[in-house]
Image (spheres, rainbow, N blue to C red):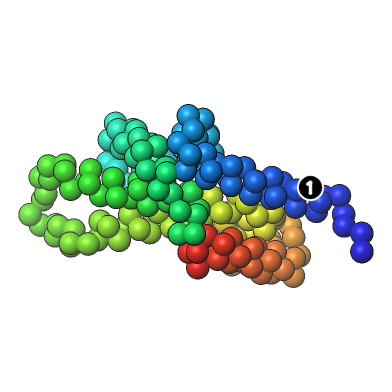
């Protein structure tokens, strides 16, 4: 069977990304100087986005971001790829540091008419945000047309019929791309040990 050139490029890009991730993992464990720069280049935008959404102001987000990167550097030799991908590990550290920052902050005055947030709600919200950012990163690793169908469905809450109308694709194509994309996501999550 002849493999189309476009598919070969995608498969090659996936293998290249896997090799780069394995090199990054090894560099972290070895404490190589370039490891932190590689972490920042590969995962910095996702980390910053998560923290900006999780914390009340940009200054706090940047301060916690620096704490996370320092912790990643210090704990790099402890990184265990069997427990999850580098991104999952980094975002887990970020979640912990964000919770520390939120607990450290002095509570702002609250209108007595409004009920305060229940204990645990803040952490649950952070967990939901962490999962969204992790899935966002995983979506970058599947074919763009499959990722776009899934984004429209689950992030914009559009039906498959609405997606077909908006994109001009046949409904069957939308369904096929969603099924294929979900399968790829499931495989990526299983590889991370997060499924």
| Foreground pick, 162 / 59 | 59
Residue drawn at the location 25% of the way across and 49% of the way down:
99
- Left or right relative to 108: residue 25: right
Quarter of the rendering containing residue 69: top left
Judge whether 28 appears above or below 185 on screen: above
Residue 45: tell me if it is visible.
Answer: no
Image quadrant occupied by the N terminus = bottom right
- In depth, the one of 27 and 96 nearer the eye is 27
Q: Position of residue 181 (x, y in %)?
A: 65, 63
Give coordinates of residue 12: x percent, y percent. Answer: 75, 48
Q: Residue furthest left?
A: 112
Give the camera-side residue of 153 and 89: 89
- In this view, which residue lies farthest toward the front? 30
Residue visible at 35% across and 46% down? 94
- 18 relative position to 101: left or right: right
Q: In the displayed structure, would residue 82 be above or below residue 43?
A: below
Q: Which residue is rendered at x = 65% and y = 46% of the image? A: 19
Q: Tell me the crowding category of disc 1: few under 14, some 14 to 19, or many 20 or more residues within 10 angstroms, Cα based.
A: few
Q: Position of residue 106 (x, y in %)?
A: 12, 42
Q: Is residue 5 above or below residue 161?
A: above
Residue pictured at 45% horizontal, 59% vertical: 83
Q: Which residue is mark 1?
A: 9
- Asked whether residue 128 is in view, the answer is yes
């Amino acid at each position: 069977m002849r493999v189309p050139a476009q598919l070969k490029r995608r498969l090659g890009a996936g293998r290249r990304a896997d090799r780069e991730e394995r090199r990054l993992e090894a560099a972290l464990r070895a404490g190589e100087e370039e490891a932190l720069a590689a972490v920042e280049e590969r995962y910095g935008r996702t980390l910053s986005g998560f923290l900006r959404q999780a914390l009340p102001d940009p200054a706090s987000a940047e301060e916690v971001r620096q704490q996370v990167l320092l912790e990643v550097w210090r704990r790099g030799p402890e990184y265990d790829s069997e427990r999850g991908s580098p991104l999952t590990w980094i975002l887990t550290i970020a979640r912990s540091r964000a919770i520390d920052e939120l607990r450290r902050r002095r509570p702002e005055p609250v209108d007595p008419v409004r009920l305060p947030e229940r204990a645990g709600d803040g952490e649950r919200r952070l967990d939901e945000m962490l999962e969204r950012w992790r899935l966002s990163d995983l979506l970058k690793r599947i074919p763009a047309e499959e990722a776009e169908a899934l984004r429209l469905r689950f992030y914009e809450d559009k039906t498959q019929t609405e997606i077909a109308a908006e994109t001009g694709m046949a409904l069957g194509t939308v369904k096929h791309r969603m099924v294929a994309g979900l399968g790829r996501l499931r495989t990526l999550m299983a590889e991370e040990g997060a499924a």
